[in-house]
Amino acid sequence: MKAVLLNGRYTTAEAEQLLTRLFRVKIDFHLAKIDTAVASEEDIKHSEKRIRQLEEELRGLTRELRAGNYRHVALHASLSLDMCPDYHNAEPKERSAMGKPALL
């Protein structure tokens, strides 16, 4: 399933506001994952790394918007939803059928 999130022309100020809010939602998602009691050390490290990446990407986009001599920009963003097998909770026999090693 696909959904179009952004597909239009915006002032640079509107574009910066939209991008900041979109990135903020994803950053907040990772911060919430870090705060959960069930987060493993690996999950926490992944979330921390992803937060740094998102912040750097946003800084780069913001720099680009501010450096240009344009008053308007086009933003295009779509989401793609793909269903994934739940092999983490599968029985060892099912995991093996999915091409994943059986957990012992």
Image (cartoon, rainbow, N blue to C red):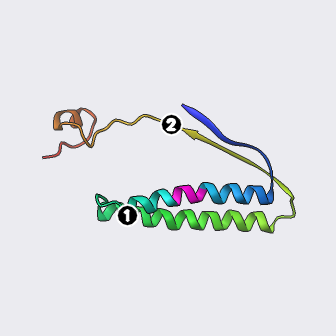
Which residue ends up furthest to the left in the rendered image? 104
Q: Quadrant of residue 84?
A: top left
In percent of width and height, residue 74 lies at 78, 49
Q: Quadrant of the N terminus?
A: top right
Residue designated by label 2: 81
Residue at 69% over, 62% down: 61
Please say whether residue 26 is one of the residues in the magenta stretch: yes
| Badge 1 or badge 2: first in the primary sequence | 1
Compared with 50, 1 (above or below) is above
In percent of width and height, residue 18 lies at 69, 54
Q: Quadrant of residue 76?
A: top right
Q: Identify residue type, mark 2.
A: Leu
Closer to the camera: disc 1 or disc 2?
Answer: 1
Compared with 12, 63 (above or below) is below
Q: Mark 2 packing: few (<14 Cα in 10 Å), some, or many (20+)?
A: few
Residue at 24% over, 40% down: 89
Q: Secondary structure at mark 1?
A: helix
Cα distance, mark 1 to mark 2?
26 Å
Q: Are marks 1 and 2 in contact (CB under 8 Å)?
A: no
Left or right of 82 in this view: 74: right
Q: Which mark is residue 35?
A: 1
In percent of width and height, residue 53 lies at 53, 64
Residue at 44% over, 67% down: 48
Residue at 34% over, 60% down: 36
Which stretch appears magenta?
23-27
In percent of width and height, residue 47 lies at 42, 62
Please say whether residue 9 is one of the residues in the magenta stretch: no
